[in-house]
Image (cartoon, grey):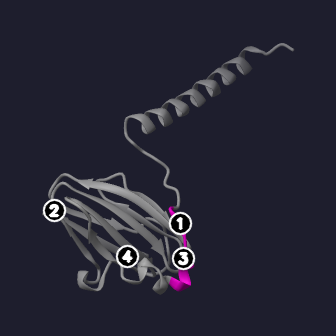
């Protein structure tokens, strides 16, 4: 079977595009540390009060390491009663924070501005990401997955001091 000139050009262009996509994926993995998040565990979203998410909040581990447990629900992030509404999570500069996040009702997003933390929150799954805060300042946590009428007011703040 003989290919005409235009078919060869199109096949070459498609092959080059596929090669570029594969190269971009490899660069993202090796140089930028971008990983696809996978669920850490599964829970019953209607029974959060029987899990570690019954008391969301920040727990300090050894040194400058922390764990933050956050619950997303329409239309707010819950991160502990003493952190306010919307919550303000405070960490010292250089802190390494592992976020454990879940959704109580519908799908939500969890994105920290200025960092590569970007999770999709599915009810019944626990998502996990680790972030190091090397610069002082305020960083917004936003829901980047449309979740209903109050989506635009669903946010929290991280304050690095």
Quarter of the view holding residue 133: bottom left
Name the secondary structure under disc 2.
Answer: loop
Is 95 situated above or below 153?
Answer: above
Residue that badge 4 annotates: 154
Under circle 1, the secondary element is strand
Q: Secondary structure at mark 3?
A: loop
Q: Image check: 143 left or right of 63?
A: right
90 to 4, vertically: above or below: below
What residue is pinned by disc 2?
92
Q: Which residue is mark 1?
A: 41
Query: Considering depth in this image, is 115 or 70 the residue closer to the camera?
Result: 70
Q: Secondary structure at mark 4?
A: loop
- At which x and y percent is residue 76? 38, 80
Give left or right: position of 9 versus 97.
right
Task: Choose between 156 and 39: the one closer to the eye.
Answer: 39
Q: Are marks 3 and 1 in contact (CB under 8 Å)?
A: no
Of the residues tagged 2 and 1, which is closer to the observer? 1
Q: CA distance from mark 3 to mark 1?
A: 17 Å
Where residue 149 appears, as percent x and y from the top left, is: 47, 81
Q: Quadrant of the N terminus?
A: top right
Q: Position of residue 45 (x, y in %)?
A: 54, 80
Residue carrying label 3: 106
Lower position in the chain sequence, tag 4 or tag 1:
1
Dividing the picture into quarters, in which one does residue 62 lie? bottom left
Q: Residues within 10 Å of mark 1 (few under 14, many from 20)?
A: few
First in sequence, mark 4 or 3: give its number. 3
Q: Nearer the viewer, mark 4 or mark 2?
A: 2
Q: CA distance from mark 2 to mark 1?
A: 28 Å
């Amino acid at each position: 079977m003989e290919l005409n000139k235009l078919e060869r050009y199109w096949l070459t262009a498609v092959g080059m595009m596929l090669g570029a996509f594969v190269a971009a994926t490899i660069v993202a993995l090796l140089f930028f540390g971008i990983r696809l998040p996978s669920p850490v565990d599964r829970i019953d979203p209607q029974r959060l009060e029987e899990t570690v998410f019954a008391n969301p909040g920040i727990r300090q581990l050894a040194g400058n390491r922390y764990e933050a447990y956050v619950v997303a629900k329409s239309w707010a992030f819950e991160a502990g009663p003493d952190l306010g509404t919307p919550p303000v999570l405070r960490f010292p500069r250089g802190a390494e924070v592992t976020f454990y996040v879940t959704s109580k009702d519908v799908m939500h997003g969890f994105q920290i501005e200025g960092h590569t933390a970007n999770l999709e929150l599915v009810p019944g799954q626990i998502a996990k990401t680790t972030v190091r805060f090397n610069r002082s300042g305020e960083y917004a946590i936003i829901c980047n997955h449309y979740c209903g009428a109050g989506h635009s007011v669903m946010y929290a703040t991280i304050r690095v001091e």
